[in-house]
Amino acid sequence: MNNQFDSEKKIFIIPSRKKKEFLERIEEDLNEEQRKVVLEADGPSLVIAGPGSGKTRTIVYRVGYLVALGYSPKNIMLLTFTNQAARHMINRTQALIRESIEEIWGGTFHHVGNRILRVYGKIIGINEQYNILDREDSLDLIDECLEELFPEENLGKGILGELFSYKVNTGKNWDEVLKIKAPQIIDKIEIVQKVFERYEKRKRELNVLDYDDLLFFWYRLLLESEKTRKILNDRFLYILVDEYQDTNWLQGEIIRLTREENKNILVVGDDAQSIYSFRGATIENILSFPEIFPGTRIFYLVFNYRSTPEIINLANEIIKRNTRQYFKEIKPVLKSGSKPKLVWVRDDEEEAQFVVEVIKELHKEGVKYKDIGVLFRSNYHSMAVQMELTLQGIPYEVRGGLRFFEQAHIKDMISLLKILFNPQDEISAQRFFKLFPGIGRAYAKKLSQVLKESKDFDKIFQMQFSGRTLEGLRILKNIWDKIKVIPVQNFSEILRVFFNEYYKDYLERNYPDFKDREKDVDQLILLSERYDDLEKFLSELTLYTYAGEKLLEEEEEEKDFVVLSTIHQAKGLEWHAVFILRLVQGDFPSYKSMDNIEEERRLFYVAVTRAKRELYVITYLTRKVKDMNVFTKPSMFLEELPYKELFEEWIVQREI
């Protein structure tokens, strides 16, 4: 058996006694499904691994088995979605077989791509001494290119950066990219193209690569150099890929080209958990894998070691309504528990109160805060819960994202109120002024100093400026003339005017996810309507934010916090008890994702399968729109289920 190359010589290594002992452990430690993958996944192999089915353990044992057979770790590539996941798998494998496998090529696609380009990049004109741009440096370079080519253009570097990345990773043409990601600027397609071309040229001049280049040039290397493709085909006798349902077009092409001759490719994933199309991932990679690699063996891991039968029954019912999938039925291993709860509340305020009261009860029963997860479709869905948790002194953290009031667009809106309340707040003033075209750091500082000294907003319009700065001041004056006639205690109206007159358009120009940010701002304005005192409003927001930061600092080593997370950020995690917020039509599924309803349903499936013992799914009866309460419709994902069989229904009522 060939397992290692040294020039023309092929070396066979006789398995050690430790490795023989490991082979015996496969029989003891794995179920039949897992053993089949470990022992039989030669050639093109696809593992459909349901949630909680032990896929990480299976990959670890497969790597260990290959090494136990005598294959050198340096001839194995292990691709994961985080370097930490790769390190975890390598460490577990080493503990199993009790010897080092550090030579394995393990890590993310980007990590491995970088290693390959350092060796072979010169073949396609890449100087191996390149530096890698981080996201901030990349955006600054994009901004420089925009300023150089179109100095009067107001496009934000953030939106351009997302468009560039999406194009590279999906292989789509510019027309498709803008229609999908930023239809509001479709008329600027030529500007976007030219800035992208200039950005690519500047990177080459500076000998730098951005994050996406590590994949793109790896792909180009495989495409253009038959010799390198053969070297890599021969070098990596086995390739294993985790979370294959989350790969994008570019990653799929890299795998296809790397396995043109040697067909030992094992990909592991779950099409039912493919939820990242918004960042370029495509479910087509996993669905079409058997067509790309004829003769593929398909393995299923369906035994769930995480959740109760009642939660698994619900998950199976949810996902079976999707048509484009590998049909499977997850089988629970755990003993029976209570039914999931379908909770009817009046509105978001009552939802927040319910969630916090149940969290308190669970904690009294001995459930740690860190074993409780609150999941939501969009960040703004959690605002009321965050406020209620803070009010009741329950520690929590927002996983994978900023707290509601720490988000840039919320801080932008609040900066206006802060300088109205305290004109000496130069930090807030500079933030506010920089929102306007032509006003950079230097001019924002000058304007904030004038405001601080005069305490009179109108004084800033008496300063002498020219060019784009003058245009920015004209826009600001037009808005200020409308705001200054509004009594300061009617600050919710001030926010509304600023948003409608200017900031809404600013979001569209600068952020691909501007609709989500608009909803955040709507929630902020609704919250502000509950207050009639600006000082109290600002103080509570500041104390609220500070409380979160202070808790994180104090409990950094052993923290016991309730976890709040978007469902996208929660994938791969699990909690004893899970709350899923706002199962309301238009919110979940999101109104803007109705053209991809199967992915929205997969998102619900992912949320449900995070729960181990307790699950609460919450829907509304009404919602507040401006100053009116309107009736809502429960999510179609609830209405399509036989929910009276699957759920125990609760109706929340307030004690009088």
Image (cartoon, rainbow, N blue to C red):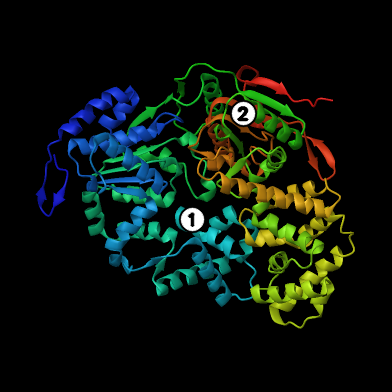
Residue 260 visible from this viewpoint: yes
Mark 2, residue position: 363
State which tag comes first along the sequence, 1 or 2: 1
Seen from the viewer's position, the closer of residues 320 and 618 is 618
Q: Position of residue 278 (x, y in %)?
A: 54, 48
* Kind of residue sitting beneath label 1: Lys
| Quadrant in which residue 637 is drawn | top right
Residue at image coords 32%, 36%: 60
> Does residue 564 appear left or right of residue 245 in this picture?
right
- According to the picture, the residue beneath numbered tag 1 turns out to be 172
Q: Position of residue 420 (x, y in %)?
A: 81, 63
Rendered view: 414 above or below 356? below
Q: How many marks?
A: 2
Whether residues under marks 1 and 2 lie with C-beta atoms below 8 angstroms apart, the answer is no
Measured as percent of width and height from the top left, residue 626 is found at 82, 45
Q: Callout 2 environment at 10 Å: few (<14), some (14 to 19), or many (20+)?
A: some
Left or right of 66, for residue 443:
right
Question: Is there any visible trace of residue 474 in the rendered image?
Answer: no
Which mark lies nearer to you, 1 or 2?
A: 2
Query: What kind of residue is marked 2?
Result: His
Q: For the residue labelled by badge 2, is the local secondary structure a helix, a strand or a loop?
A: helix
Q: Residue at x 69, y 41 (%)?
A: 390
